[in-house]
Image (cartoon, grey):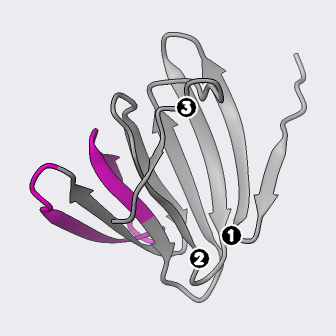
Amino acid sequence: MSEKLEIKRDERGDLIEVFKIPGVGQIFYATTKPGAIRGNHYHKRKEEYFCIIEGEAKIKLRNRDNNEVEEHIVSGDQPEIIEMKINWTHNIENIGETEMKLLVWTNEIFNPEDPDTYAEEV
């Protein structure tokens, strides 16, 4: 099997939806330029887990019910998995001097007709 993948490119960097497995979810890979921020949204049902595999990032989450804020400084030098909690608005900022590389697992395959993504600043 061989399948060409689409690279979604914008001013922040690239995003590639790599694996889409019904009933399991989706894995995507993103690059982010220094100083760029991704996210500033929340999900009502979608679970996401982020892992920086190269570079440095600040991940911020805010509980929409009580405004509790969490901040994680993460690095590809010591990879760790950070959960993007349901109903918490979240973002990720490249705080390093080089391109950041991010691996994400989510429990749903992205559906543009039902994206479960709601814009809101952290």
| Quadrant in which the C terminus is drawn | bottom left
Taking the spot 37% from the left edge, 34% from the top edge, the residue there is: 47
First in sequence: mark 3 vs mark 2: 2
Examine the image and state in which quarter residue 78 appears: bottom left
Taking the spot 60% from the left edge, 63% from the top edge, the residue there is: 101
Q: Which residue matches tag 2?
A: 36
Tell me the distance, in whole angstroms, between the alpha carbons under discs 3 and 2: 22 Å
The secondary structure type at the circle numbered 2 is: loop
Taking the spot 70% from the left edge, 51% from the top edge, the residue there is: 15
Choose between 116 and 38: the one closer to the eye: 116
Residue extending farthest to the top is: 23
Q: Which residue matches tag 3?
A: 115
The secondary structure type at the circle numbered 3 is: loop
Residue type highlighted by circle 3:
Pro
Is 82 on the left-hand or right-hand side of 53? left
Taking the spot 52% from the left edge, 85% from the top edge, the residue there is: 96
Residue type highlighted by circle 2:
Ala
Q: Mark 2 and mark 1 in contact? Answer it, CB < 8 Å.
A: yes
- What segment is highlighted magenta in the picture? 65-91
Residue type highlighted by circle 1:
Arg
Q: Mark 3 and mark 2 in contact? Answer it, CB < 8 Å.
A: no
The label nearer to you, 3 versus 2, is 3
Choose between 116 and 92: the one closer to the eye: 116
The secondary structure type at the circle numbered 1 is: loop
Q: Position of residue 32 (x, y in %)?
A: 64, 69
22 over 32 or under it: above or below: above
The label nearer to you, 3 versus 1, is 3
Is disc 3 surrounded by few (<14), some (14 to 19) or many (20+) residues within 10 Å?
few
Q: Which residue matches tag 1?
A: 12
First in sequence: mark 3 vs mark 1: 1
Residue extending farthest to the bottom is: 97
5 over 91 or under it: above or below: above
